[in-house]
Amino acid sequence: GGGPRAVVPAESAQAPRNASLTNVVTDCDVAKTADGRWFTPFSTAFCADALTLYEYATLFAAVSKLSTNVSFVWDPRNWHDDAAHPLFPSLQLLCRSIVDCAESSAQSAACEDFVTQVDGLVVSNLEEEYVEPFQTTWNSSEALIDAIHAATIGPVEQPTEAPTDTPTDIPTSGSPSGSPSVYPSQVPTLTPAPSTTVTPTVTPTTATPT
């Protein structure tokens, strides 16, 4: 199929507005609207920039792995803003750092930045009662980095050419606890993403799967 293959912010994301904390509740890596438009469960509150399909598959797998056993991270009531460490753009910096670390070696500056972003959010923005459970689950920088590389295919060369096949059916993962079932060769063009949430105390617009 022709046309660009990427995950890009929806047109509505260009106009700031107040919106509900959760725009989409799904554990599927991509979903399709009745009018045939594809979208992801991540809003521009979390990932502000366009992602290649390779980067998106990497991000979905990594976030799914990192949130295992710490489902409280999805509840917006468990986060707060901090003047010294604003929730925004910290969440967006985290999004980018996850992708960069997943595509880099464990000793890279990209993975060091990822750990820094996680630590900053947990210490400054996560409600106090959840800090210890999070740090117990992810008790070292090595554990965080290893989890990302285990969930994804690790630091490898990205494909240099876009695939030409466009399937009619998109397999979706039944649970975000495993690797995503959507990869660059399987996904059609994704143009819209969920709307931007501009309330300063929100978190990524995903929800704990039930």
Image (tube, helix red, strand yellow):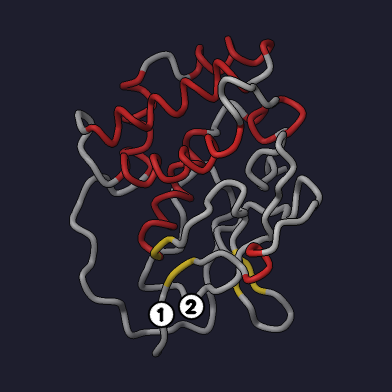
Q: How many marks?
A: 2
Using residue 67 as the reference point, say whether residue 77 is left or right of it: right
Q: Quadrant of the C terminus?
A: top right
> Does residue 138 sit above or below 65 in this rendering?
above
Horizontal and vertical percent position of residue 5: 41, 75
- Rendered image quadrant of residue 183: bottom left
Left or right: residue 20 compared with residue 109: right
Q: How busy is the neighbourhood of tag 1: few (under 14 within 10 Å), some, or many (20 plus)?
A: few
Q: Position of residue 54 (x, y in %)?
A: 36, 61
Q: Which residue is mark 2?
A: 189
- Residue 189, image x, y percentages: 48, 77
Above/below status of 115 relative to 51 = above
Q: At 31% from the left edge and 79% from the top edge, which residue is drawn?
A: 163
The local secondary structure at tag 1 comes to loop
Mark 2 nearby-residue class (10 Å; few <14, some 14–19, many ≥20) = some
Q: Is residue 141 above or below residue 204?
A: above
Depth-wise, is mark 2 or mark 1 nearer the camera?
1
Disc sitting over residue 132 in the figure:
none
Q: Earlier in the sequence, mark 2 or mark 1?
A: 1
Three-letter code, disc 1:
Pro
SS for callout 2: loop
**Which residue is at a point 41% across and 45% down the rendered structure image?**
96
Residue 17 image offset from top left, x and y in percent? 76, 56
* Residue positioned 80% across, 52% down in the render: 18
Q: Find out whether the residues at labels 2 and 1 contact each other: C-beta distance under 8 Å.
A: yes
Which residue: 22% across, 46% down? 155
- Mark 1, residue position: 4
Looking at the figure, which quarter contains the N terminus?
A: bottom left
Please name the amino acid that badge 2 sits on: Thr
